[in-house]
Image: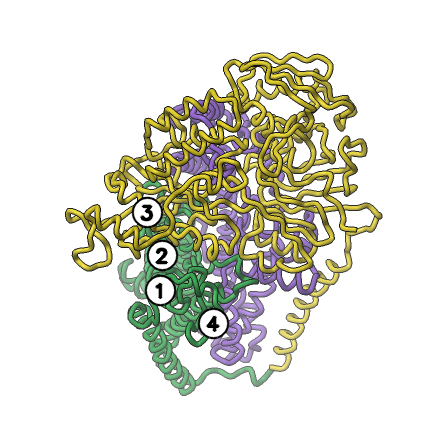
Chain colours: A green, B yellow, C purple
Amino acid sequence: MREDKKTPSVRKLRVRKSHIKTRLVLFLLLTAALMLTVIFAQQICPYDPNAQDTSISLQPPSLEHLAGTDRFGRDMFSRILVGLQTSVLSTLCLVVIITVAGTAAGILCGYYGGILDSVVMRISDVCLAFPGLVFALAIASLLGGGLHNAVFALAVISWPKYARIARSQTLSVKNTDYISAARLAGGNSIQIIIRHVLPNSIGPILVTSMLDIGTMLMELAGLSFLGLGAQPPTAELGNMMSGGRSMLQTYPWVIIGPGIAIFAAVVIFNLLGDTFRDYLDPRNSRRN
Amino acid sequence: MRKWKKFWALLLTACLGTGLLAGCGAGEESPEEDTGKKTFVLGDTTFNPENEEPDVNPHNTYSGWACIRYGIGETLFRYSDTMEIQPWLAKSYENVDELTWKITLQDNIKFSSGRTMDAEAVKECLEHLVEVHDRARGDLMIDTITAEGQTVTITTTEPKPTLLNYLSDPYGCIIDMEAGVTEDGIVAGTGPYIAQSLVSGQELKLVKNPDYWNGEPGYDEITVRTISDGDTLTMALQSGEIDAAYGMPYASYPLFENEEYTISSCATSRTFFAHMNFESPVIQDPAVRRAIAMGIDKEGFVETLLDGNGYPAAGAFPENFSFGGGSVTTETYDPEGAEKVLEDAGWTDSDGDGIREKDGQDLEIRWLTYPSRQELPLLAEAAQATLKEIGIQVEINSTADHNSIRVDHDAWDVYASAMVTAPTGDPEYFFTTHCLDDSAVNNGNYHSDRLEELEKELAGEFDTQRRSELAVQMQQTILDDNAFVFCSHLQMSMISKSTVTGLEAHPCDFYEITADLAPAA
Amino acid sequence: MKKYVLRRLLQLIPILLVITFLSFGMMRLAGSDAVLQKMENTGMVVSQEVIDSARAELGLDKPFLTQYFVWLGNLLRGDMGTSYISGQDVFSTFLSKLPATLLLTAVSILLTIVISIPLGVLAAVKQNRFTDYMIRTASFLGNSMPNFFVALLLMYFFSIRLKIFPVIATGISVQSVALPAITLAIAMSAKYLRQVRAAVLDELSKDYVVGARARGISFYTTLTKSVLRAALVTILTLLTLSIGSLLGGTAIVESIFLWDGVGKLAVDAINMRDYPMIQAYVMWMAIIYVCVNLITDLSYRALDPRIRLGGEKV
């Protein structure tokens, strides 16, 4: 096992750092491409995504209809593009809200402890334990349907996860020597949190939020059943997948097309997230 | 480094190994034992407490449906394929006067408990029924029942022309009250099969009734499995774990359209229709209602969206009823005609956005529906597209919360629902529940003087022929007002393996497992 | 320590009160009720009198607060009521669904650990190499497939093509737990292996690892002795969250595989507005979360002595 002692030399770290930069640029470009597609979906889609033509319903992919047609005879490719827009924008919005809110709550709880910690954590117990479906039903009936209400409903029930992770991370760095040192050096709490606690806890949080993009996308679709979420004819990826569920054996393109789009979005955001995390990692830059 | 790799290789192999072992272990255990008994497994999506079928006791909510469908109980009268009343456990009847019915029972029929079915047994059963079952009490309006040998005499509190229809409802299954109802909800009936064990919402086990009065049942043992998920039902039939299925999703039909399976289908009176909200200013305009009726492509909806698994509707009732199908006339799909109707009524598209306006107001309707019936959101989306072509903007609200929204008249314009229009084969039910001033679900506050008048006549009419005529007139009144738009009738299908015969869909959806069900020769 | 545990368990009482009251209120806000839902399902209209008498029978005609306190009173006397839908005793119905959920939770968590920890560590060790990218891509794939899709694919291949497992679960057995557990484990592993990777990477770049390597301690030893142990805090947090939600049941997977657990029971109850059953479920979830959190906090301490439990004097 002698060869395992490859202590990273300064030179190697520099190389790694420049690799990170290259990758970051690459993934940023990919993300930009995705976002451009999302923003200009209406302009680039070859057909009107809502135009029905029942004479060509459920056609397999062809040159004319790259991803086939759905049972209303609508062009799947156009619907996937537009669906990507609906899904990505609302999901990003949701994930940003819960990540920021949850992380803030978790770090404060972990750092200060005491009553604040107990109260916030009990609230989070209630949110976690409370069946999301009950809450969503109440929202649907109180505020009415619509995507923004669905985002709101999901945000309320999803933030505690981030609070939990952030709290546990904070707890594990709180008593480390460098925090104590920073405190002794007279740094105020906010500075310590921002300079030391946050950078040391962000890794797992960022990974969780990137991964949640895929999950939240499907959860948003699940709510449309309650009248929350996108209403027809709005195309939405999760909805398209669950709507095509029983066609898996007979007309698979109806469900696989949107699935690939979700996969692509998830991959791009996650790779970006990972690289961004590597880039932010204080230990990578400290030695630079 | 090498050691490192070895470690992972070992770990992964271990994981795979356990996985495989689990797989093999599972593969070896084969619980199927060939005992020479003829067995049959039916997969059903509806047999569960959520559908009000928690058990097979006909005196409990809608459990009678399970009792009659799975061949446990039988009713005094039954429906023919053309939905006419025929004697079943009864031999004949006599309508002595408006309030008195004399029913003579078949001889030599025994309950599975061993007791002979005589007038006394029927009396006990019906008396218990009206005592515990609110719906039955309201339907039957029984005053007295007298039993004498094989003759039951029933008097009603008011003239009840449809008494025999109501007696044919699944709640009218004749069961042995002496044997009673077990804790699991099992009863003793007269049918070809005897319920043996029941787990609510999961499984019902039946055995052959060796003393069945009307032919020999074809199987020794039958299992009814509740499989609420349509895709699971599909795969269970594909893998051969069930022999027949009820409630298959339409998208799965192509998998079974070959000689290995038999599909038996039939139109039922479960109808997809739209209520117009007469409290809504836009809908109050008869031209708008007419244009909506003309702007929905019913044939297209049935042919492409339901893959042909449905029947375009004209009125409230399907073709196999004497007062159903084409006996009424209504608007057909005619986009040009609809545009002209709107144009004449002053709805024009002056700003060129594709949506018509009148007095500066866009022609926009709010379409309320719910997703628990898979066809309803499809119908909404199809209507949205075809109505847009004639210049009507449709906002869809497909929500589980529709029950509270539909009672708020400011919240919707059109409400599409799926309801059974003639559960007892008689037309009156639909009008009394949906269209009259005091109807429970006259959601759109529709009112027609003529309809109220016709209903008064229908309520007291005993002649079936005349009842049919009245039903046609009443439907026509509704359709002329475009108060409801009937879109399609549900097709009820049962798919069975070709090794099974005698599983036939029936228009009233009551009869599934009968003595005719048997292995193919 | 004992005092701490006791105090945490006592917190259960206010949480239960708050949460049952909330769910009671929200279900009323959600509109509709059991009587109307049943009417919708059967497609049969019943007269207003029948609706009213059915409501009165269930006590739905009483004011909201009265309903809540009647329920609470009965609960304190040990009676959780009967289901509005099946008419069965709520407590025993709920209890009868628990073994299936417990088994599925245990098996899928076990599978998840077995898949995600080795793969996550491997990906971290091979950071940004081919292996890493392969593993991560697989995790993205697992992450972007909805679980009904995974479930149907598995069922198609294993039950129809290979005929290894039956489509219909018959009782609780190895055969029937396999597919639902794999379905759940695929989604969870996809998440966790990435968390494991991130956590291990974090630890790997810490000074003590670098130092240990410089001192000639083998990489393998460092990894197993220090790195994994430290990374376990994160993994544990996530796992406990998952155990919590798994114990709450997974309606989609349960209904596809006819797995008779509490998830489908809960969703059916909510859809049908079966209030007593919903209350039972809500209480179960609250109890799970409080207990699971307590165990997590205790194990944080065991794993990382630097963490102090709230209320303990330093």
Mark closer to the observer (3, 1): 3
**Left or right, residue C180 beside residue C194:** right
Residue beneath the point at 72% across and 63% down: B21
Is the same chain shared between marks 3 and 1?
no
Name the residue carrying label 3. Answer: B292
Name the residue carrying label 2. Answer: A233
Report, in whole angstroms, how far the alpha carbon at label 4 lies from the one at label 3.
Answer: 34 Å
Element type where label 2 sits in the image: loop
**Amino acid type, label 2:** Pro
Residue beneath the point at 48% across and 25% down: C54
Q: Nearer the viewer, residue C121 or A283?
A: C121
Mark earlier in primary sequence (2, 1): 1
Report, in whole angstroms, how far the alpha carbon at label 3 lies from the one at label 1.
Answer: 23 Å
View extreme (right): residue? B36
- From where the camera sits, is residue C55 visible? yes
Report, in whole angstroms, how far the alpha carbon at label 1 lies from the one at label 4.
Answer: 16 Å
Q: Nearer the viewer, residue A139 or B103?
A: B103
Q: Chain of mark 1?
A: A
Element type where label 4 sits in the image: loop
